[in-house]
Image (cartoon, rainbow, N blue to C red):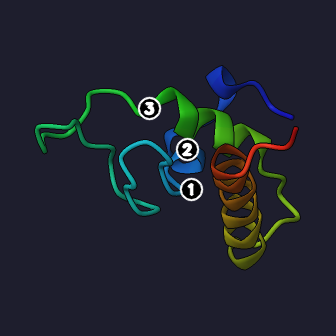
Amino acid sequence: MVSPDKLSPKQILAVRCPVCLALPREKCTLSTGQLCVKTHLDRRSLAAKMTHSENFGQAVVRVVKDATHRTLGILFPQR
């Protein structure tokens, strides 16, 4: 995994932002709708986790799978 600080803006913008849901190649937005000066930390962390061998389709499936797993865990906690 690469450090989020060492990523280029192009690498960071290659993934969808999990915070503001900005599409790939779009800048992050604030809750007011204005553009952020910096990208969200979660987006930088997600970009750092992606490997170069992973294509966009695989990345989408992985992100959706992780989000679904977390959401279902919240809705249906195991005892």
Residue assigned mark 2 = 12
The tag earlier along the polypeptide, 3 or 2, is: 2
Residue 26 picture location, percent across and down: 35, 57
Pointers 1 and 2 in contact (C-beta within 8 Å): yes
Secondary element type, mark 1: loop
In the drawing, what numbered circle is on residue 73? none
| The quarter of the displayed image where residue 12 is located | top right
Q: CA distance from mark 1 to mark 2?
A: 6 Å
Q: Amino acid at mark 2?
A: Ile
Packing grade of label 3 (10 A; few <14, some 14-19, many >=20) is some
Tell me how many marks there are.
Answer: 3
Query: Element type at marker 2?
Result: helix
Up/down of 76 relative to 7, above or below: below
Q: Dot 1 corresponds to which residue? A: 15
Left or right for 50, reference 53: left
Q: 67 or 20, which is in the foreground?
A: 67
> Which residue shows up at 52% across the image and 27% down it?
41
Q: Considering the numbered disc 3 on the image, is that residue within a helix, a strand or a loop?
A: loop
Label 3 or label 2, whichever lies nearer to me, is 3
Q: Position of residue 54 (x, y in %)?
A: 83, 66
Quadrant for the C terminus, please.
Answer: top right
Q: Please, is residue 9 above or below residue 72 in the view?
A: above
Left/right placement of residue 25 relative to residue 42 reads left
Q: Which residue is mark 3?
A: 40
Provide residue 70's location: percent of width, then percent of height: 70, 48
Q: Amino acid at mark 3?
A: His
Foreground pick, 30 / 78: 78
- Label 3, label 1: how far apart the Cα atoms are: 12 Å
- Amino acid residing under circle 1: Val
Between the residue at mark 3 and the residue at mark 2, the CA separation in whole angstroms equals 10 Å
Q: Earlier in the sequence, mark 3 or mark 1?
A: 1
Q: Is residue 3 above or below residue 25?
A: above
